[in-house]
Amino acid sequence: MSTDITRPKCRFARVQWGGVLGEQENSIYLSVQLIKILGLKPGNTILFRTGSLRRAVTVSPVQCSGSASSQPVIFISPDLNDIPRFPVAAGLVLKYCETDGILSAGPLIGLLTVRNIFPESQFGSQEPLLTALVNSAPGIYGFIYVFCPEDIDWDMSCITGYVPAPDPDPESGAPVWVPLRMPMPDVIYDRIPTRSAEARPEVTEAKTGLAVRLGIPYFNPMFLDKWETHQILEKCPEVACYLPPTRLVETPDHIRHYLDFYGSVFLKPSSGSLGRRIINIRTIGAGHYKFRYRSRERETVEGIVCDFKALVDVLKPVMGKKTFIVQKDLHLAEYEDCPFDIRVLAQKDKWGNWRRTKIYVRKADTGNFLSNISDGGKALPISTVLEKVFNTDFRARDGLGEEIRRVIQLIPSALEKGTGLTWGELGLDLGIDREGKVWLIEINSKPFRVLVSKNSTSKIIERSLMRPLEFAKLLAGFYRHHGDLIP
């Protein structure tokens, strides 16, 4: 039996923001045609909403020819000072729901981040990405702004949001960020850049206030812990078979046990990233061990010790007080005599389905045991590598390529179900061992994206920007098909 009767009956229209018009008070001005499309009636009083702001307004018809593109236009009366002054001609979606009598303009998408400590760059290394995301707003007919915890005015239920000015600073070339008084957004895309920033009290308070107290849809809410992620995924039988044998290091004996059983292991910080403090240990004889790790200066440190106690003495200063996991060495397949893994950017689309936006191979630099591009690794097309190493076509409907595509679908869904949280994009690191078995190495909940790359087409880069924004628009309820996705 259809459940459509339980869903709000909503009508949608794409419009351009026209600014202020007329002398009437508490009025919005729409063309007669737009009033009909939305199912409104001239002279009626309705509730107008944008973000968290709600105002009772009168619907007034206006004679206007629209813009050069014949897009319908919405105007507001000058007295509605608290309604955001969107840039003239900014694209928005109007949604009118007959059941509650609310006309919504949006979506308003908030990008939550933190400020850089250096004044010459307000948002640090994230500035190019944040600028690109905000400037992508016309592609979804919405408005996007950047904000930090200290920009929230809880008492007034508003935010000082920032958008990049059309022209950068003439001297430095850096973006100039223009402050705007904005309502709370319809949806929040978490762009907190580091674990240390995420742990700040003001960030924790902001996330709790926005997502929990106010109930604003919120996605990619946190960095992932490797051990907690492993425990979640191993409960899913379809995914557990892709997880390397892993355990939490609580005593040195746990490392010894894995070395005795597997011969070669990796120690990884449970909350680490970028390959920092990853240690490879191999048994090379009775009681002898060879170790390798990357120093803080990003140099490879290696050596041989003659007993396990000496190994522990080496490990202690490297591991410090961090929580570590120990994991079986997967003995990854090699391309041109160097181990490689597979990096995937998985993102949800406007229907809420997981899609593969980008996939490529990362080949470790000669003599290195890490494939990170920042450590000298090289990005290569996956089809080239799989063809040469395994004599298989990545695009084939069966075989290794199909299994990789299946894993890309399984893992994000299992993580979402296991955490009970909403994710819009994930970075997956996959490995293939020398026998051709696929493994999950790591999940990155805050995948980094470069905006200029010789390994990515402009179409892929644009898609990587648009998909999280389209998913945000879906969460905010500004797609016609949104009601079809409500359970």
Image: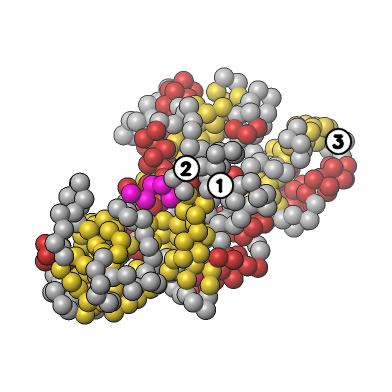
Q: Position of residue 259 (x, y in %)?
A: 73, 42
Residue located at (44% from left, 66% from top): 182
Q: Of residues 188 and 344, which is closer to you in this image? A: 188
**Relative image position of residue 12 (x, y in whole percent):** 21, 62
> As displayed, is residue 384 above or below residue 94?
above
Pointer 2 local density, CA inside 10 Å: few below 14, some 14–19, many at least 20: few
Query: Which comes sooner in the sequence, label 3 or label 1?
Result: 1
First in sequence, mark 2 or 3: give its number: 2
Q: Mark 1 sits on what residue?
A: 126
Find the magenta span and give its range. 133-138
Quadrant in which the C terminus appears = bottom left
Query: Which quadrant of the view contains residue 292?
Result: top right
Q: Write the residue at 36% across / 35% down.
A: 459
* Residue 240 appears left or right of 272: left
Of the numbered discs 2 and 1, the one sitting upstream in the chain is 1
Residue type of the residue flagged with mark 3? Val
Classify mark 3: helix, strand or loop: strand
How crowded pointer 3 is (Cα within 10 Å; few <14, some 14-19, many 20+) is rated as some
Place of residue 455 in the rendered image (x, y in percent of width and height, measured from the top left):
47, 28
Residue 201 found in image quarter:
bottom right
Can residue 404 be seen in this snapshot?
Answer: yes
* CB under 8 Å between discs 2 and 1: no
Q: Which residue is mark 2?
A: 167
Q: Quadrant of the N terminus?
A: bottom left
Q: Amino acid at mark 1?
A: Gln
**Colour logic:** secondary structure
What residue is shown with label 3? 305
